Amino acid sequence: MVKRTSYQTGSEEIPLLCELAGDSAHLIRARWVAGALVLLATVLSVRVLSLPLAEGSFYLLGGFILLYNTALALYTRRYNIPDAAQCLARTQKIILVQVALDWLSMAVFLHLTGGICSPAKPLLLIHVLVIAILMSRQITLLFVLLDVGTLTVIAYLEHAELLPHHCVTPAFPSGMYSDPVYVGSRLAFIALAAFAIGYLTTTIMNRQRQRDHRIAHLLLTTQAVSSTLKLPNLLGDLVRCAAEALSVRGASIRLIDESSGRLVFSASHGLSQAYRDDGGPELSVEVFERVVLSEPPLIIHDVSQDSRLRHPQAMMREGIRSMVSAPILSRGRPLGILNVYASEAYAFQAAHADFIMKIAYLGATAIENALSYERLESAGQERGMFVRMVTHELRTPVAGAQSLVRTMLRGLVGDFTEKQSELLHRVDVRLEQLMDLINDLLALAAGRMGGLERQLKPVPLLACIEQSVQRLNQEAESKHVEITLKDPRSELHILATEDGLGKVLGNLVGNAIKYVQAGGRVGVDVKQQGDLVQILISDNGIGIPADELPHIWDEFYRGRNARNAGITGTGLGLSIVKHFVERFGGLIQVESKEGKGSTFTLMLPLCDPSSLSGPDSPTCPEEASADPEGIVSHNAAT
């Protein structure tokens, strides 16, 4: 059998702690009833039925039960230990104290009701049953010995007349408590019944706890595999959960390499680096194919005696004595194999293999999803690289053509007629639009291929906002648009890239300028909110129709009012913004009313540059000075 170790410190202790705390509370509530029943039964037996009971002793016993139960109830309510391990140990001790006090009360009760002749002897078996449900087999057997021993001692002391014998049933033959045959048969029956109840109950409870433990680990495995699409993290969670659920030596996953068809060591838990580096597949190819085709997991009871293994000596050096191998199948297609190892021979049975198979089933779907995600991610990066390569190759000839057209427009190659100049101007506008599209495609590809870009570093936000506003100031002046920047007095830093943050701010502020009428207003408001910074970019321009708001982040999407107004654009700006904002760990939202303007709200996490920055940390251009109120106003209308 697989040895079941104690629950580990952490989240796994919580279910056991809750169970024990609930059991302790049930015992306390039941003891209120027991103490009250002792007092009530004494009154009825003596006053109504006129039974020859030691009335005062029973009152003292009932009062004692209620007294220590009150102390236990107050203790459990008053003391609260936040650490799960300490709280679990304390709860176990409280339960042990309770059953010990109950044992003492039961011993007194048995003596007062006739000892070996007591009609309350079944209470002893009930006491054993309660202990077997709550405690381990060792403690249960200890209390079985105590209970049987207590009854034996009481019978001996009464027989030796060292204790008075209380006869509570006058119809019962007197002197039976001193009859060796009667006493011996009763003690033998009680001992046999107590040991049987204790053994069977602890066996059932141990199996139930193991089953609950595995179910809890299945839930943890489900949560783990559904929380990530990164294959290394997923495989690590699977092998860890498999090993910890059965409390065994370790576990590993070998996936089938699609190019070579070979099993590749992909993840492990509890195995040494030397074994991971040197050990090939444990099973032969024929055995692995048989496992995959037949589906049931394979149990290796003793690695030193099983000829189906390829490297038994290496496994024994690693401390592995038995193993279970379960195929990882997705839609009938083999993905790999899950191996679980134990340090003892014959450690696994069919129930353990079935549990490992369930983990393999859970892992198969998650692994398939993770592999699909990797393929999609790889395809996305390849597409991004293709877009960057193509647009970069287009940029040079377009820039050259644009330079030639502008040289001609400046009259450096001779004079042109008015019609020719108009045509050249149209060509220049189209080339400018094409260059904008190329730049946006490059920016979009860069945003998608974040892993190929520079690493995120602390960037001074306010200085970069000021730079973006200054860069767009000429465009604002041409439309007599007033830009108002309101920011905190102190500099704020976010984890980003300078070029990415510049594209975000440039697109948002540039769009605000583009979509306002001449003489309009654009506001940039920066506020710190705890560990976040809020940037509001608002305008009083043409706004966005309500039915189009969900689509503005789509690539190449442009609103109908912008198209009707003849405002040029590529429809990529907001897609670029969203990609970079998500890469920076932020959030962007928009509120807009058609004909009244729009407000884009950008939330970005702040960072501490002193803990992240180094000698090569990026810097933005020199910060603009703010007035005493923290407001910088760029008024192009004047």
Image: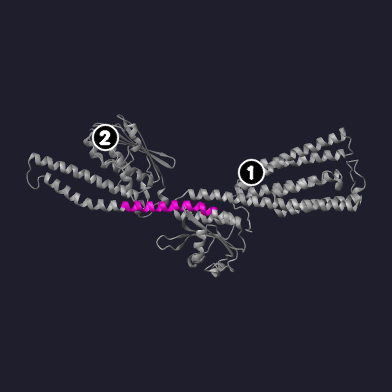
Q: Circle 2 sits on which residue?
A: 562
Q: Residue at x 53, y 53 (%)?
A: 359
Magenta-highlighted residues? 358-384
For the residues labelled 1 and 2, the Cα–Cα distance comes to 64 Å
Measured as percent of width and height from the top left, residue 163 is found at 89, 48
State left or right for residue 430 relative to residue 264: left
The quadrant of the image that shows the N terminus is bottom right
Mark 2 and mark 1 in contact (Cβ < 8 Å)? no
What element does badge 2 sit on?
helix
Looking at this view, name the residue that lies furthest to the front: 294
The residue closer to the viewer here, 511 or 82, is 511
When asked about the image quadrant of residue 123, the answer is top right
Compared to 395, does 33 lie above or below? Answer: above
| Residue 439 appears anywhere in the view | yes
Label 1: which residue? Answer: 80
Residue pictured at 40% horizontal, 53% vertical: 374
Whether 508 is drawn above or below 299: the answer is above
Tag nearer the camera, 1 or 2? 2
* Kind of residue at disc 2: Ala
Q: Is residue 380 magenta?
A: yes
